[in-house]
Image: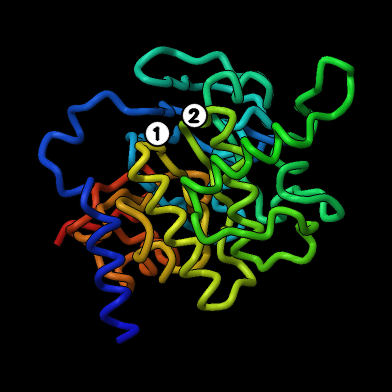
């Protein structure tokens, strides 16, 4: 039964990647020839990736492969040395996190960055609180807006009055995602969203991701869990030593082949080789 559920989830998650002509559509975001070095070490070296609306692209690789650095450039945390970023086909000027937010780019970190001692509504509007005409917090309006966005994202969520410290890992993810999409995020960066979660909570996060896809939100997924990658992602981009080893639809490669890309840098037939792919000598 569990295997059947995983297969069904995978079928649903890959529906967009199987649609003809997707590659011809203007990407929601495109990073072209991105490079950055720290002290002479090339953390990201001439990397190009694309993300389409309603698509999940997994970025995978060992620690130090460059995936987190690449994403920090997109989120404005790092300033790139070279390369260009395009959002909906128009070049984006991203020098800091505030710039990224203007382009609808939001990051959901593994720590979630939630204020544990307050409830969902207070977290949703943290730093952007709604005020009454008398200059006091408009708790009623903030809760109403929170119920509206959570109703669309996670209809089963009911614990609006409780501090988020009392919520499960999956429910906390719901709050973090709701905060991002309420302020018109179109591009989500999710950093290890199921790390330290149990099977039931991981399944809840998977349902959240599927809901976001249906709303045409594009997601960059950073994960060390190969099962997450194949359960949630439409495409996978493997990085090694700051370069792209290869890119593939998850329907065109196996888990073992992706592991071979991560460990050996060997690009299988179902993937498009990148600059970091192992160059095999001709027979």
Q: CA distance from mark 2 to mark 1?
A: 6 Å
Q: Quadrant of the C terminus?
A: bottom left
Task: Name which quarter of the figure residue 47 lies in.
Answer: top left
Find the residue positioned furthest to the bottom.
1
Q: Is 103 on the left or on the right of 52, as rendered?
A: right
Question: Left or right: 23 with respect to 63?
Answer: left
Q: Which mark is drawn over residue 261? A: none
Asked if residue 1 shows in the view, the reply is yes
Q: Who's the residue at 51% across and 78% down the image? A: 199
> Residue 87: where, in percent of width, then height?
42, 21
Numbered disc total: 2
**Which residue is drawn at the image coordinates 75% and 48% (left, top)?**
113
222 and 2: which is toward the camera: 2
Secondary element at tag 2 = strand
State the residue position of label 2: 34
SS of the residue under disc 1: strand
- Tell me which label, 2 or 1, sits earlier in the chain: 2
Reply above or below: 124 against 117.
above
Residue 60 located left or right of residue 49: right
Residue drawn at the location 61% of the way across and 25% of the way down: 101
Asked if residue 42 shows in the view, the reply is: no
Q: Which numbered marker is on residue 48? A: 1
Residue 273 image position (x, y, % from top left): 28, 48
Question: Percent from the top left, x then y, of residue 180?
Answer: 59, 37
Instruction: Return the x and y of residue 149 as percentages of the image width and height.
Output: 54, 41
Is label 2 in contact with label 1 (beta carbons under 8 Å)?
A: yes
Of 86 and 111, which appears nearest the observer?
A: 111
Mark 1 packing: few (<14 Cα in 10 Å), some, or many (20+)? Answer: some
Residue drawn at x 32%, y 61% as measured from the top left: 266
């Amino acid at each position: 039964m569990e295997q059947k559920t995983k297969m069904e989830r995978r079928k649903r998650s890959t529906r967009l990647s199987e649609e003809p002509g997707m590659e011809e559509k203007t990407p929601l975001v495109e990073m072209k020839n991105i490079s950055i070095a720290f002290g002479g070490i090339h953390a990201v070296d001439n990397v190009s990736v694309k993300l389409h609306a309603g698509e999940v692209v997994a970025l995978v690789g060992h620690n130090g492969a460059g995936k987190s650095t690449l994403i920090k450039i997109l989120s404005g945390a790092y300033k790139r040395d070279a390369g260009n970023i395009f959002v909906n086909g128009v070049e984006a000027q991203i020098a800091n996190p505030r710039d990224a937010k203007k382009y609808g780019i939001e990051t959901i970190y593994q720590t979630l960055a939630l204020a544990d001692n307050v409830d969902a509504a207070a977290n949703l509007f943290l730093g952007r609180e709604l005020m009454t005409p008398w200059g006091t917090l408009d708790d009623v309006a903030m809760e109403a807006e929170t119920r509206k966005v959570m109703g669309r994202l996670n209809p089963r969520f009911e614990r609006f009055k409780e501090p988020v410290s009392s919520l499960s890992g999956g429910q906390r993810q719901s709050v973090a995602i709701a905060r991002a999409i309420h302020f018109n995020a179109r591009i989500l960066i999710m950093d290890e969203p199921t790390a330290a979660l149990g099977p039931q909570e991981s399944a809840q996060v998977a349902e959240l991701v599927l809901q976001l896809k249906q709303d045409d939100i594009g997601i960059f997924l950073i994960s060390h869990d190969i099962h997450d990658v194949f359960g949630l992602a439409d495409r996978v981009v493997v990085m090694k030593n700051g370069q792209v080893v290869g890119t593939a639809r998850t329907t065109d490669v196996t888990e073992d082949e992706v592991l071979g890309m991560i460990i050996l840098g060997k690009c299988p037939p179902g993937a498009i080789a990148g600059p970091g792919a192992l160059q095999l000598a001709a027979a």
